[in-house]
Amino acid sequence: MLKKPEMVLIDVDGTLVDSVPDLAFCTDTMMRQLGLPPRGETKVRQWVGNGVERLIKRALLDNLEGEPEEALYQKAKPIFLALYQENTSKRSCLYPGVSEGLIWLKSQGYRLGSVTNKAAQFTYPLLRDLGIIDHFEIIVSGDTLPEKKPHPAPLLHAASFFGIAPEKALMIGDSISDVKAARAAGFQIVCLSYGYNHGVDIADSHPDGVIDSLIEIKSLLSEAA
């Protein structure tokens, strides 16, 4: 049974936003510019969730694990970053129920923040372009601190900002990285079933709850002790 939180932190990619269409476009365009075969959206969907640096490496390797040749990576990275700067939100969209869920959380007086592994230069334009940036009092991006999820530091940073104890906080995410960060920080954790978890059912990571749409947080928190 969930306990009613005072603060809710929400992940971005795979939780609020389906950003894969833009990421796949940038990945495949980068690959073509390097004279390498494009990987396609299906593979990119399995690779996202750990920041663009990791995505670039996975695309170069055509594999979830491993390290590409350093010279190739250093050539690829600026190509991808330039592409993504111009294509942060052209094809990305909010998942169904996100706007309604955020509006409900705000109406109930929950303090809202966003914690993502996406760099700030991409996070702010994406949330702004999709019309949801004003819901959040704090945005902790992948380069706000030296550590990113699954390290607990980004979550604890937000808790400190609000002056709220971790045991009175809830993280909403979609991946094992979110679950690990929440557990390490002492947060409760609810996950979306549809997100980016490298093809693994997020229920296997044993979050405190799994929902199919953000609007379902309404019933979960309404029943919370």
Image (spheres, rainbow, N blue to C red):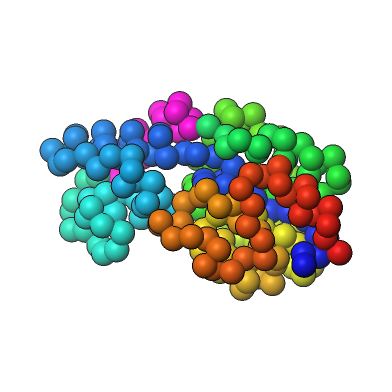
83 to 69, vertically: above or below? above
- Residue closer to the observer: 29 or 146: 29
Residue 215: x percent and y percent?
A: 71, 42
Residue 113: x percent and y percent?
A: 70, 49
Q: Residue furthest left?
A: 35
Say which quadrant the C terminus sits in.
bottom right
Lateral position of residue 51 relative to residue 27, left or right: right
When asked about the image quadrant of residue 170, the answer is bottom right
- Residue closer to the observer: 42 or 65: 42
- Secondary structure mainly formed by the magenta segment: helix
Lateral position of residue 65 relative to residue 146, left or right: left
Seen at 41% across and 50% down, the residue is: 48
77 to 197, vertically: above or below? above
When asked about the image quadrant of residue 76, the answer is top left
Q: Which residues are magenta?
A: 77-92
Residue 155 in view in this figure = yes
Seen at 84% across and 40% down, the residue is: 107
Residue 137: x percent and y percent?
A: 74, 45
69 to 80, vertically: above or below? below
Residue 23: x percent and y percent?
A: 38, 39
Taking the magenta stretch, the answer to whether it contains residue 150 is: no
Residue 133 in view in this figure = no
Seen at 64% across and 44% down, the residue is: 213
Lateral position of residue 132 relative to residue 56, left or right: right
Say which quadrant the N terminus sits in.
bottom right
- Residue closer to the observer: 192 or 132: 192
Seen at 53% across and 32% down, the residue is: 93
When asked about the image quadrant of residue 4, the answer is bottom right
Total numbered circles: 0
